[in-house]
Amino acid sequence: MAISFDNYLGLHQQALEFRSQRAEVIAGNLANVDTPGYTAKDLDFSKALEQAREQLSLAKGNELHIQQVNSPVAPEVVERTETQPSADGNTVELSKEQAAWAENRAQWEASFTFLNQKFRGLEQAING
């Protein structure tokens, strides 16, 4: 009997990928903290996760059959507008970016730990 890792791992695999992509966006913001006119960016994580959840919803034609659509979901990069721009038009706030980095890192670690536990459970099932 074959196992579908997409079904077994669920959203957690994509959540880890989204968190990695968000880290890149936040790093870009930090790199441009002194760039005149630069607008801070972020990923619309909740929207991307909702799209991934919709794709993982299972459509059953028969109780014994499960059908799943597997197409990658790319999170949308959006500009942050809730901040007051500096005199040069830059909207990156160092403290907010550092806090976002730390929060994203903690959430990435949590997703990674969860996936590790899923694979350990599979290993235990295989080895007994």
Image (cartoon, rainbow, N blue to C red):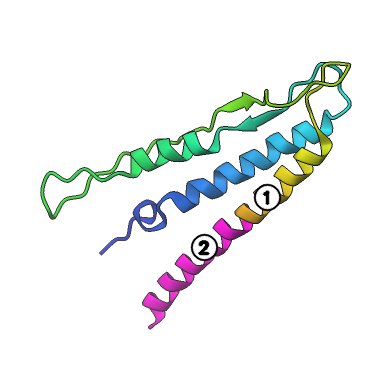
- Identify which residue, 94 or 77, lies in the foreground: 94
Tell me where the magenta segment starts and ends, as one range: 109-128
User: Would residue 27 appear left or right of 125 to someone viewing this image?
Assistant: right
Res. 103 mark: 1
Name the residue located 34 percent from the left edge and 53 percent from the top edge.
7
Q: Disc count in the image?
A: 2
Camera-nearest label, 2 or 1? 1
Q: Which element type, helix, strand or loop, lies under badge 1? A: helix
Identify the mark nearer the N-term, 2 or 1. Answer: 1
Task: Please state the horizontal and vertical placement of residue 45, each as a whole percent of the image.
Answer: 54, 38
Residue 49 sits above or below residue 113 on the image: above
Q: Is residue 122 magenta?
A: yes
- Identify which residue, 79 or 9, lies in the foreground: 79
Identify residue for label 2: 114
Q: Amino acid at mark 1?
A: Glu
Quadrant placement of the C terminus = bottom left
Task: Please state the horizontal and vertical placement of residue 32, each as a whole percent of the image.
Answer: 83, 28
Q: Residue furthest left?
A: 62
Name the residue located 48 percent from the left edge and 72 percent from the top edge.
120
Q: State yes or no: discs 2 and 1 in contact (Cβ < 8 Å).
A: no
User: Would residue 98 appear left or right of 104 to someone viewing this image?
Assistant: right
- Identify which residue, 92 or 68, lies in the foreground: 92
